[in-house]
Every structure is written in structure tokens, then in C-alpha cells.
Amino acid sequence: MGTVTVPPWKQLLLSALESNAHLRHSSYFQLATIGSNGRPSNRTVVFRGFQEDNDKIQINTDCRTRKIEELKHCPFAEICWYFTDSWEQFRINGTVDIIDGSNSDPTKLQQRENSWFSGSLRSRLQYLGPNPGLPILSEQPSKEVSPDPSTGPVEAFCLLVLDPHQVDYLNLKSNQRLTFTSTPSPNGEKSWTSERVNP
Amino acid sequence: MGTVTVPPWKQLLLSALESNAHLRHSSYFQLATIGSNGRPSNRTVVFRGFQEDNDKIQINTDCRTRKIEELKHCPFAEICWYFTDSWEQFRINGTVDIIDGSNSDPTKLQQRENSWFSGSLRSRLQYLGPNPGLPILSEQPSKEVSPDPSTGPVEAFCLLVLDPHQVDYLNLKSNQRLTFTSTPSPNGEKSWTSERVNP
């Protein structure tokens, strides 16, 4: 068994999450992708934790949102995560794996199911609502559907997993900036190097 | 003289700025662009107001940052602006005009100068510092330079002006979402239409 080394930027991120934990929005970040028209696209999403034992970042989303077609077209994304209390910014770029119900990998399907069950019952409801981003067809409120708490993920539920390649860390209090770059090592693990750069 | 109509999304944005004004970070948003490698790029920048009498959004930046070469390569950008107190999100996409000291348009050079002088003396200092994003060459603190308050913009100072094409507004308290789309009208003014869409 090799020793598991926590990437240095992940340690900084975990500390930032802790010191900003009193703010509800500290788990929100902005995810930039490239639209099908070749133009940038940017929206707020919620951090759903790291994958167990590694540095991959999980996001829940609806299969019917535009980001899914965008990521199918171009799997690269950059997270910009600004912590409003500690004045720290993390820019994390990498590739995104889309895990929907049609995925053929049983391990990934299990991850999707775990992510579904770790969300609240209320958060699961939105995946039963009308197609996000489409015009509202009816003024009538949609019927209240209450899913069975034991029912697994519905079709529209999708887990996104971002595999970080590079991280740019900026601390506006200390005015320090660090870039972290990964290189794949022979055993499949990434190794990270860091460099101090001008803010 | 025609009547000047404030675009409906601008009114919403001005209200959001007012109701979140007690938070320093309410003027920060994330700007996504496309990197020279074709991958998305995303960072926090500061809102420097609208251009007088229109809906164009001003941002100050350093000519030496990567976003400048990115925008020269691809002028499209998307702002994602989340207001943490009122739970409102504005996604604003459009094209960005880069106004540096070499610009040939006297009106634009004047706008750049105005933007320079409306920043604090302290904020002007950063444009005299070492090249942002490059490795730190010396452990010695850089000499304190104090610019003359009456001196105009230094070479590294750049004004970005984003001309909005489309705005996606989401209110997480009321769970309402609106998209605003502009079409150019014959007199050069934009006209805006809006549509309620599913959140």
C-alpha cells in the first residue's frame, strides 16, 4: 500500500471551506465551459464534495441543462471559486466526466446513486420538474410530486466529475499567488508541482 | 431627442447591487473567456460601473494578464454574477472591447483615463508591480512606488468594456428565471425582449 498524499492545493481548499463554512454560499462556485457556438458559458453550481480518496470534484446537475451538451462537445471546464470571507480564489481547470443513467461503468453508476441519496429530498424534486431553460408553457403551478425517499436517481439526474489538471490559487489578504500543475505519474496517480507567481 | 429606455435586466441588476451593497464582494463577478488553447478560462473581476447612459459593463485590468491575449483571440465572454444576499444570478454574455493606451479612438482613450482616475491610488499601484502570473524572481519586496495622483494611466492599465447580447436572470428566492435577448434596431440602439423560462 502506497501512502496517499493530499495534493497541496486540496489542503488549501479544505482549509478555505472550513474557514468560510458559516456562509451558505461558500460551497457555490462558477463553472465555465464552452458553448456549442464556441463561446464561453458560465454559471453557479454547488460543490458536492471530493470523490473518496482523490482530488476529483463532484457536481450534481440536470441532464437537460445546456452544460451537458456543451461538455459532450468540449469536456474542458474551469472552476472559479471565490471565498468571500477569507478572500481566497481557486481557479481549477480540468476535464469533466458526465455520469448519467446510461453509463456502462457499474462503479460510476454507484457514484451517481450515492450522490443522489446524499442530496436532500427537496433537492431531488427539481429533477422531476419541467425542462430547465425552456419557456414556461403553463401558468399553473406544477403538481407537487413527492418522490419515495428510497427511490434511486431519476433519469434527469446527472453527476459531473471534474478531474483537476491545474490550479491557480490567489490569497488577497496575504497577496500571494501559487500555481499548481499536475503531471501523470507511471502508477496512474498524479503528481503536483507548485510555483509562486506574481499576483 | 428619443427617450432613453433602461433595459429591463439592467433595472434588475441595479436593484440587486443596491440590496447587496452592504457586502464588499457584491461588486465581484466571474468572467469566463476562451483560452488560446481553446479551453475555458474563468476568474473573478470587479465591476467598475456601466458606461454612461448605456448598458455596457466596465472592468479594469492589467494588459499583461492572460485574459487580454485570450480576448484578442476570441472577444466573447460570459459574466456570471451571483448575489449572495438576495440569491440572484445574472449570466451576461457579449463581446469585449479592449481599450489600452494604443487605442486610436479619442473617446475610448478618454473613457480609459476616466476609469483610471476613478480608481483609488492604492489600486493604481498594482499596475506598476511585476508581471502578473509570472514566476517570482526575487524574494526581495518590490520597491514601494507611489504614483503622482495627477499622473494619467500607465501603460499596463487597460479598460475592458463588455457589450451585453443576452442576459439570463435567476432568482433563487422566488424560483423565477427570465432570459433577455437583444436585437439591434435601425438607430443603433438595442431592443430587448424577455421570456420567462423554467428555472
Image (cartoon, coloured by chain):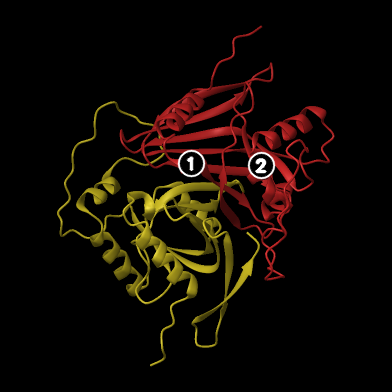
Chain colours: A red, B yellow
Query: Which of the two residues, B119 or B89, is positioned nearer the viewer here?
Result: B89
The structure residue drawn at horizontal position 72% and vertical position 31%, both measured from the top left corner, is A111
B197, above or below A22, in the image:
below
Q: Amino acid at mark 2?
A: Leu
Query: Marks 2 and 1: same chain?
Result: yes
Residue furthest bottom as drawn = B1
The structure residue drawn at horizontal position 57% and vertical position 42%, both measured from the top left corner, is A46
Quadrant in the rendering for residue B195: bottom right
Q: Which mark is residue A81?
A: 1
A150, above or below A12, in the image:
below
A115, above or below B181, in the image:
above
Question: Which of labels 2 and 1 is toward the front?
Answer: 2
Chain ID of residue with mark 1: A
Query: Which of the two residues, B133 or A128, is positioned nearer the viewer here?
Result: A128
Quarter in which the C terminus of chain A is drawn: top left
Q: Position of residue B132 (x, y in %)?
A: 38, 41
Q: Is residue A173 left or right of residue A4?
A: left
Q: Is residue B3 left or right of residue B126?
A: right
Q: Is residue B121 left or right of residue A21?
A: left
Asked whether residue B160 is in view, the answer is: no
Q: Which mark is residue A121?
A: 2
Chain ID of residue with mark 2: A
The structure residue drawn at horizontal position 36% and vertical position 57%, both measured from the top left corner, is B158
How crowded is the residue under tag 2: few (<14 C-alpha within 10 Å), some, or many (20+)? some
- Sequence-earlier tag: 2 or 1: 1
Quarter in which the N terminus of chain A is drawn: top right
Q: Give SS at disc 1.
A: strand
Q: Position of residue A16 (x, y in %)?
A: 43, 31
